[in-house]
Amino acid sequence: MNRRDSPALDIFALVVLGCAGYGAFLGYRLADGVDSLIPNEMLIGGGIGLLIGLGLLRIGNRVFKRLGIGPSSRLFGNSGNPFLSPQAQKVQDQKAGVLTGEDLIQRQILDWLASTRPDIFAAHIPNGGHTSWRASHLLRVGMVKGMPDLILIGARGQVGFMEVKTESGSLRKEQRSLQTLLTARGLPHAVVRSPEECDKALRSWGW
């Protein structure tokens, strides 16, 4: 399932603010006549309103994620949820079957290879998007930081690697180190951002 842009999540964010504001207003009305700059009732009302809004936001986020709907503005940031780090959001997206960013591009590349270059075997090397405990376990059993996203094996036994990045993505330090190691040993390595770039890389390898 791929995420598509929609104002729905942005509207829910505004609902959060609206509920908090309305709760604060009710608290102020309840405290009418109380000689205080910020009446306790106003704080309580605002808090209750905020909790209701956050509850609606959480429910809406889950529903829209199942439908593959993402935010249409920067109100939610890149992750689609203002209360999760990008890494945590990626884990939740994976659990919900939602493909975004590099994952989406990688799926498109694999689909293109399957339909256009069936002579090439391609597989993903799991190396990211894990919770801290899972990543720690994988490192203990042999996962290497910086391994490319895809390993490709040609019909004549050629082996190559591809790192999938978004338009603004760049190689991390450990990924650059692996790129240097692989190319030094005669294994082709390419950074690709689309099926078209994948095709271009394969042609440059002579595949």
Image: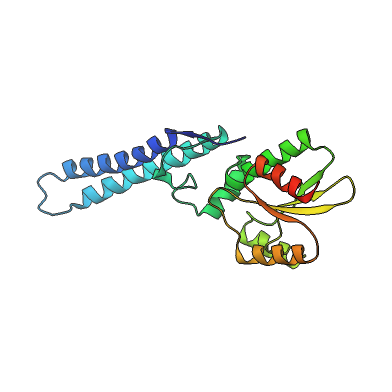
Which residue is nearer to you in this view: 60 or 93?
Answer: 93
User: For residue 198, what is the image quadrant?
Assistant: top right
Left or right of residue 119: residue 51: left
Picture residue at 39% right of the left edge, 44% below the top = 75
Instruction: Please state the horizontal and vertical placement of residue 31, each as a whole percent of the image.
Output: 16, 46
Residue toward you, 111 or 45: 111
Residue sitting at the far right: 156
Q: Residue at x 50, y 47 (%)?
A: 79
Residue 161 place in picture, x, y as percent: 75, 54
Question: Number of marks in the image?
Answer: 0
Where is residue 60 drawn, in percent x and y? 47, 36
In the displayed structure image, the side of residue 71 where residue 198 appears, left or right: right
Residue 49: % across, % down = 32, 43
User: Is 147 drawn above or below residue 122 in the view shown?
Assistant: below
- 5 left or right of 115? left
Q: How is the image coloured?
A: rainbow
The quadrant of the image that shows the N terminus is top right
Closer to us: 36 or 92: 92
Q: Nearer the viewer, residue 192 or 22?
A: 192
* Image: 17 above or below 168: above
* 119 up-or-down from 143: above or below: above
